[in-house]
Each structure stands twice: as structure tokens, then as C-alpha cells.
Image (tube, grey):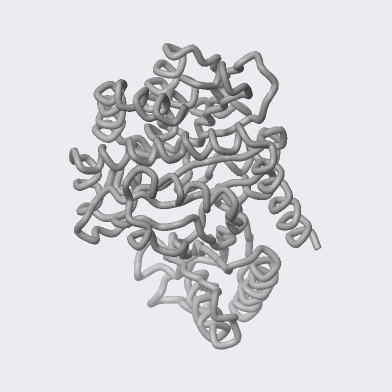
């Protein structure tokens, strides 16, 4: 059966590369991925999948479903297709989305014999307001047995951890005045922002070592001869678990309140992007994926242990069903994600070959779980243990 899966993906190699190339050449920002989502939905529709679009009033989100007609597990392949501002597809989401498409096509070739259901989730805006967050909260993954995706990288890496994250905006309002003639009449909102940065920097020595707090001044006033009436800062606040992230957020909010009190400004605090939970990889699924990479010719010694690469909205999905997020080698020069160098290398024949290899490993991993109830039960048992720890 795995031979059928891999030969099916190989048979559709050129059309799949065309899809990846098209999305890579037409980068679109989050929730604006009109061309990418339409192309993916058209391809899935042509392969016999039923399409639901939009999802949760998100116009570029979709769920594509293929039922075998035989009872069995439901697997989700996840597609991301948003690009980065100015850089384009420097995170390789054109490869991620096509991997999900290819894996679904490959698994579909045997599903009518194996049984079960394939779902392909089109999830916009992973880089900002990731659609997996509201989709998870709405229960759209609650009846999924397991979810799979893989990320392009410069090496192979097992599915690992990610950081929980909140995105907070602090907006201060003071009182304008002529900075030379009557500065004493003003209330300087920029001073409040600067005090906030100083307070957070002072707080860092009491933060746990896994915490990450980084921000920008998004509004610093209008002109140097006017006391700034408004000023604002945006921060990402991260740690390796949701409980400590929540604690850290409250401490930073108190820093912000202190800055408002010192300057006499008013303060508004808001979340400018969705909150991401930490990723909890299902080790049973991860080990199966690694074994399938080895079966496909990758030296196990070349597959690194999972690491923390920041924050991903798949973390929220991993609270609702077992999930993995391994990395697939698509470049060989050590190019880092979110750089022009990675973007350019991710459009080469080598990158497309890596993409297809990743799709085969994803589809074969799904097959391993779907044909063996004992393996599926192990996946479920591990997931339940993780959820109990998270909820305790």
C-alpha cells in the first residue's frame, strides 16, 4: 500500500510542483491569500474532495473532505499559505500547503481499501492571526484522530516544542503641547512608552530563562516640537508554557500601568493578534514519521532532535487532537527561515524534491496509524496524558 501512496505522489509530481511554484510566485499576506486558497481548493476538488469554504467567516480558510465510505480514523493534513511582508514566501508556506495537498492525494489512493476519512484544512495567516486558533476554539479539530503537517527547513528535525505567546499592544494617551514654548502644559505619551521598555528590561532579570519578550514602538509621536499626545508599543510575550506566559503577561501589564501612573497618561491594553499555546508533539506520531523518513532513504543520523523555533498556531490544535510538526530539509546551505536566501532556495528543484519527500512521509505516517488500531490507541493514550497535564 505504501508503494501505491508514493507512486501516486510521484505520478502527480509535475502538477504538484506547478502548484507550489504558482503559490511561491504569488505571495499573499495573511487572510488575503485569495490566489493560493483558490488554487488549492480547485486542485482538491479535481481530486474528488468536497470543499467547505469559507470557514468561520474566514474567506481564505477551507476544509476539504474525502470519505472512504468505510468506518475508520479521520486524519487532518494542514496547509499554510500566507507570505511575509516584503519577503514573500521566506518561510516556505508554498511548500507546506503543497505538502498537505500531495499527502492527501497519496493517501486517497488507498483510502477506499483502508477506510476512514481525509480532511485537508486550509489555515490562513499562521504568521499573524493564525486561523488554527479560532478553528480550534470552535471545535473543528475535536473529531479528528490526528493532525499532520511538516515545515521546510535547512535540515531534518523531529517534531518538537514551541512557545506559548500573547501579542499585546499598549496605547498611551497624554496631552499635546509646544515642546519649546510650553512643554510644562503637556503630558508626554512617548515618555510612558519609554518607561514601559525600561520597566520590562528591569523585569528581565526575574524572568525564567525560557521567557522571551520583544517589542517595538509602533507610534512615537508626530513631530519633535510637539509633546506626543499618543504613543504605542507592541510586544510578543512568550514562554515554553501557557501558565507561565499568563503570569508574565500580568507582570508586564503592571509595568505598563506603572508607566501610565508616572506620566499621567491613560492606558489601553489589547491583544493585536491571537494568543498561541505551546506545541505538544505526539511522540508516537513523531516516531512513526521519523521511521518513514528512514524508509524513504534518509539517514537517521541526519534527523535532529526537535527544538523550539518560536510560536506556532498548531500549538492550539495540539490541545484538541494529537499532532506533529516536523521539519523537512529543502535547502543544504544553512539558510535561515524568514530570509531572502531561504525564500530563493525554497523555489529550486531541490526544494520541490524535499517537499514531495515530506508529503510521502506524511501520507505513509497516516497510513501506519489508520491500518493499526493498536497504534491509534497509543496515539490517543499519549494525547490524553498531555491534555490532563495541560488542564491540571
- In the rendered picture of this protein, how many numbered marks are placed on residues? 0
Front in this rendered view, residue 148 or 85: 148
Q: In screen coordinates, is 112 left or right of 19?
A: right
Q: Is residue 227 above or below residue 222?
A: below
Q: Residue at x 42, y 27 (%)?
A: 5
State the image quarter where residue 14 is shown. top left
Q: In screen coordinates, is 130 left or right of 10?
A: right
State the image quarter where residue 10 is shown. top left
- Residue 326 coordinates in the image, percent (x, y): 45, 51
| Residue 355 in view in this figure | yes
Q: Residue at x 56, y 29 (%)?
A: 58
Front in this rendered view, residue 144 or 25: 144
- Residue 318 coordinates in the image, percent (x, y): 63, 49
Q: Quadrant of the C terminus?
A: bottom right
Q: Residue at x 55, y 58 (%)?
A: 167
- Residue 200 coordinates in the image, percent (x, y): 54, 79
Q: Residue furthest right?
A: 392
| Residue 313 in view in this figure | no
- Residue 244 coordinates in the image, percent (x, y): 67, 71
Q: Is residue 201 above or below residue 51?
A: below
Q: In screen coordinates, is 210 left or right of 154?
A: right
Q: Is residue 228 above or below residue 312?
A: below
Q: Residue at x 59, y 46 (%)?
A: 323
Amino acid at each position: 500500500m505504501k508503494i501505491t501512496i508514493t507512486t501516486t505522489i510521484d505520478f502527480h509530481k509535475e502538477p504538484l510542483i506547478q502548484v507550489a511554484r504558482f503559490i511561491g510566485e504569488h505571495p499573499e499576506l495573511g487572510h488575503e491569500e485569495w490566489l493560493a486558497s483558490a488554487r488549492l481548493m480547485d486542485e482538491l476538488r479535481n481530486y474528488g474532495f468536497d470543499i467547505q469554504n469559507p470557514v468561520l467567516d474566514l474567506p481564505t480558510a477551507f476544509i476539504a473532505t474525502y470519505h472512504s465510505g468505510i468506518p475508520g480514523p479521520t486524519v487532518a493534513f494542514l496547509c499554510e499559505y500566507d507570505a511575509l511582508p516584503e519577503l514573500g514566501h521566506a518561510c516556505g508556506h508554498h511548500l507546506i500547503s503543497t505538502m498537505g495537498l500531495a499527502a492527501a492525494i497519496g493517501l486517497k489512493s488507498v483510502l477506499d481499501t483502508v477506510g476512514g476519512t481525509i480532511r485537508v484544512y486550509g489555515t490562513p495567516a499562521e504568521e499573524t492571526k493564525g486561523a488554527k486558533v479560532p478553528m480550534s476554539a470552535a471545535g473543528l479539530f475535536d473529531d479528528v484522530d490526528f493532525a499532520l503537517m511538516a515545515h521546510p527547513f535547512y535540515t531534518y528535525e523531529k517534531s518538537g516544542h514551541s512557545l506559548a505567546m500573547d501579542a499585546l499592544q499598549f496605547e498611551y494617551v497624554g496631552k499635546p503641547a509646544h515642546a519649546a514654548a510650553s512643554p510644562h502644559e503637556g503630558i508626554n505619551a512617548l515618555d510612558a512608552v519609554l518607561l514601559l521598555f525600561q520597566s520590562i528590561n528591569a523585569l528581565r532579570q526575574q524572568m525564567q530563562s525560557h521567557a522571551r519578550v520583544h517589542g517595538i514602538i509602533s507610534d512615537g509621536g508626530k513631530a519633535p516640537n510637539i509633546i506626543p499626545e499618543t504613543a504605542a508599543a507592541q510586544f510578543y510575550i512568550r514562554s515554553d508554557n501557557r501558565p507561565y506566559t499568563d503570569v508574565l503577561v500580568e507582570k508586564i501589564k503592571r509595568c505598563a500601568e506603572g508607566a501610565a501612573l508616572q506620566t499621567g497618561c491613560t492606558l489601553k491594553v489589547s491583544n493585536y493578534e491571537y494568543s498561541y499555546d505551546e506545541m505538544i508533539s505526539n511522540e508516537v506520531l513523531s516516531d512513526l514519521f521519523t521511521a518513514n523518513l528512514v524508509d524513504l532513504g534518509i539517514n537517521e543520523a541526519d534527523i535532529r532532535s526537535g527544538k523550539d523555533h518560536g510560536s506556532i498556531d498548531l500549538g492550539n490544535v495540539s490541545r484538541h487532537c494529537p499532532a506533529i510538526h516536523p521539519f523537512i530539509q529543502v535547502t543544504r546551505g544553512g539558510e535561515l527561515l524568514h530570509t531572502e536566501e531561504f525564500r530563493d532556495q525554497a523555489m529550486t528543484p531541490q526544494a520541490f524534491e524535499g517537499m514531495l519527500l515530506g508529503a510521502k512521509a506524511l501520507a505513509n505516517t497516516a497510513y501506519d496509524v489508520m491500518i493499526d488500531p493498536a497504534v491509534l490507541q497509543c496515539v490517543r493514550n499519549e494525547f490524553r496524558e498531555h491534555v490532563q497535564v495541560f488542564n491540571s
